[in-house]
Image: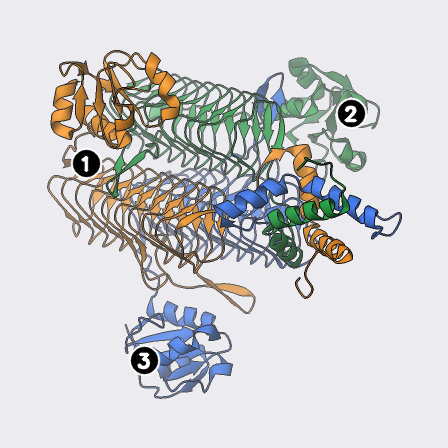
Chain colours: A orange, B blue, C green
Amino acid sequence: MSLTLASIVDRLGGELLGDGGIEVRQVATLDRASPDTITFLANERYLSRLKTTRAGAVIVGRQLRDAVDVPRIIADNPYSYFARVSALLNPADEVQPGRHPSAVIDGGATVANDVQIGPCVIVEAGAVIGAGTQIGAGSYVGHGCRIGEGCRLCPNVTVYKGCFIGSRVIVHAGAVIGADGFGIAMDDGRWIKVPQIGGVRIGDDVEIGANTTIDRGAIEDTVVEEGVKLDNQIQIAHNVHIGAHTAIAACVGIAGSSRVGRYCRIGGASGIAGHLSIADHVEISAHTLVTKSISEPGTYTGAYPFEANRDWRRNAASLRNLGDLTERIRALEKALDLRKKGKQ
Amino acid sequence: MSLTLASIVDRLGGELLGDGGIEVRQVATLDRASPDTITFLANERYLSRLKTTRAGAVIVGRQLRDAVDVPRIIADNPYSYFARVSALLNPADEVQPGRHPSAVIDGGATVANDVQIGPCVIVEAGAVIGAGTQIGAGSYVGHGCRIGEGCRLCPNVTVYKGCFIGSRVIVHAGAVIGADGFGIAMDDGRWIKVPQIGGVRIGDDVEIGANTTIDRGAIEDTVVEEGVKLDNQIQIAHNVHIGAHTAIAACVGIAGSSRVGRYCRIGGASGIAGHLSIADHVEISAHTLVTKSISEPGTYTGAYPFEANRDWRRNAASLRNLGDLTERIRALEKALDLRKKGKQ
Amino acid sequence: MSLTLASIVDRLGGELLGDGGIEVRQVATLDRASPDTITFLANERYLSRLKTTRAGAVIVGRQLRDAVDVPRIIADNPYSYFARVSALLNPADEVQPGRHPSAVIDGGATVANDVQIGPCVIVEAGAVIGAGTQIGAGSYVGHGCRIGEGCRLCPNVTVYKGCFIGSRVIVHAGAVIGADGFGIAMDDGRWIKVPQIGGVRIGDDVEIGANTTIDRGAIEDTVVEEGVKLDNQIQIAHNVHIGAHTAIAACVGIAGSSRVGRYCRIGGASGIAGHLSIADHVEISAHTLVTKSISEPGTYTGAYPFEANRDWRRNAASLRNLGDLTERIRALEKALDLRKKGKQ
């Protein structure tokens, strides 16, 4: 497939500078672009690369309107414009309606006509699958699940019974939705299992990464609101509630019953302890453990600053004495009478 | 299903205060209870919510015996009592003995009569599966595995050859038991694989979370003793030994050959380095890396305290100079003659 | 199977001291060896155990040549020698060429004659699978994938379309190769998906652990060079490049577009932020977050030193005030005139 710049601007808007008849066949990075590709620049730091790119065209922001001669599209948000162009040039694989003969679909399931069910898929009784949805090879859809329209479950996904998934949801391979939450009660030297009778509710337009796990609720549901984007290997515990349009990077763990607001951004391998509440528009840095609720938007961080091992050894050893060091500073201040009386 | 309070106390003990004829149909949280549900209060912090609950009945501890008028059951351990009530009201899905025709069961496997084998399950030669066990769709049971009675393997579980699983074990979807441990030897610029010839032994009444991995031993076995509870996405390396009734939260990694005691509680995303020994009754906080053996019960912690990013930047920068700061304090003390001579 | 010491030295080299006719049947640890086994000692710390071992033979380094009387093989690298002996005694399961009738292999796939395809495997159109490769039960090989010779894909592996896997690659159960990278662009309050049109290229002799995920590139490919060894539950984001012979322990996450050099060793649960470059021969300690590029070989660390919770509480509280403490030290120094003027 190829598109002229004129036809792109026709569909997506933006201002075209240069020859609208130029055809592009694919998107590319600045460095490896060829004349039949279109690239973009969202970060002025890479401006020098833009000047040497071999791309046939480029998408830039308003402030770079006149920075280069390359045929270009001026967009308010070059990265999202680029995403749209790429989607035009790389349309998703078409749904091929049908049920592979090796799939095991219970007679009590309700599957829309134009659903694509791959080989070795299992759909249990009472499940409902909406129009245009694809269920990848080897995936399991449990009893009474409801999956909306236009979803894509990749291969080897597991959805336990009674879970609800909205429309246009993408679930990557190996993800597990609705496993039992980690509910155990110590009783006379043994753990008793607390039945996990809640479900999982996933909103529209959510994307769930490979091998991510979202547990069912203990009593009420675990909820992931619309537009949430989850990377790979994330763990969402029982009764967590993730607000709409929040994006969570890989390897994050969110403990039971915590609520995360809307439009949050959670960095990789960070964690949120249980029973907390995180406001909207909060950003958590990578490798940070959140141990208290956060009521104000902003960025929060708690990663240990890495350094050469010999430096770390010395500083970390001092860290183990930091409480003592603080008292020694107080004693020094007292000796020098530097601190106001009565103030500690 | 519904139960009268009298019948609950009949089966589970405890003291009933109020009308024993009241029927409850389900368990509920304090806040969302309706009159046909039973709830519980384990934490006095939520006492005010108890006073406004619409629940038909409540389970409370002795100290709250007279705190409310609601019909109630007095129990020594309200949370475990609640778990038992919930199990009465929400019995596990019954095993439906039979082998789905799409399952591939080797003629050399020994499968008890009342086992439930789901669609697309593979059971290899020499495997033995005990009575009342369920094997979920798409799961794989390797050559010579032994799985006890009353187990539940959820869909898409993989058990490599020669692993041993006790009775009443639950394994959630995507879990992998018995993959090769990470044994490699550097030899002349290339890694050589060290054959992993040990197995995995899982005791009775263990629960293993979704996408958790338990590697086989390098030479001897990796061992998870009875009653251990593992949350999702945990990594147990080769030759690890987990003592009975230890509970491990999600995303924890335990490196090779470490031994964890009995009745330990390991917080989410924490880690235990290799070749260590952790005593019984040790509690590890979330996001803590244990780098030395622990011989005394107690709670151990090593998470960086998170804060607003601007505060973190300032404090983390100082942390990189903490060794120097310590020496500057010593110099100050020396100048003021505050430290005893000869003491560092 | 059993081997005489003489035949071992015949095949693998090394110096034999003692009776070459002694037969060993299996490898063993020092402590649990029996007379028909061979063990090894790589670390002099365990020398005392060597003196009491019941092993029939032992592999030791040159410096321990005369430390014991046990029949022994002297090797430059006892651990890699041991690995080779174990491989002789424990040969990998033989490939059993054939396609299980339950496998679904598209007519447009090219599968060499001596490939072993397990039950419920799916191979899509355009895929090419080389000689001697095994595809484990329930695994999925997407459209146009190329898998080399002598590979072993364990059960329930997912390889998305268009990925390239070299020869002699081992992929453990639950691993996911080629899922979409986490590419999203915020646009007017909603995330837009950025098509992930790159692929994944895995070099020869790579091993990939259970439930590890390697995302496809956004535009160009994600690359794992030859001889890389990846433990379980690792996350490799889009456009990451891992240099040859690097070994990565479990639970590590590497964010998008970062480059890791050759012969690096990355400790468990550590992380590398996005768009960084790590030199060859760099060692990262466990639980360390790397936030800047590293240009020099060496060991880098950033884990918080764990301690008893009461000590941690005190030290962590002081850590939150460390910036202030630094200023208080400066003030003390100024009062005592200890710091040179103009120096901060």
The chain to which mark 3 is attached is B
Q: Which residue is mark 2?
A: C71
User: Mark 3: which amino acid?
Assistant: Gly
Up/down of B220 relative to C16, above or below: below
Could you classify mark 1 by the number of other residues whose Cα lies within 10 Å: few (under 14), some (14-19), or many (20 or more)?
A: few
Residue lying furthest right in this view? B341
Residue under pointer 3:
B56
Residue B238 visible at all:
yes
Residue B9 appears left or right of A77: right
Q: Do the CB atoms of the residues marked 1 and 2 lie less than 8 Å apart?
A: no
Q: Position of residue C54 (x, y in %)?
A: 76, 36
Residue assigned mark 1: A101
Residue drawn at x 70%, y 43% as measured from the top left: B325
Front position in the image: A180 or B136: A180
Regarding residue B221, the answer to whether it shows in the image is no
C14 vs C125, nearest the viewer: C125
User: CA–CA distance between discs 1 and 2?
Assistant: 61 Å
Q: Are marks 1 and 2 on the same chain?
A: no
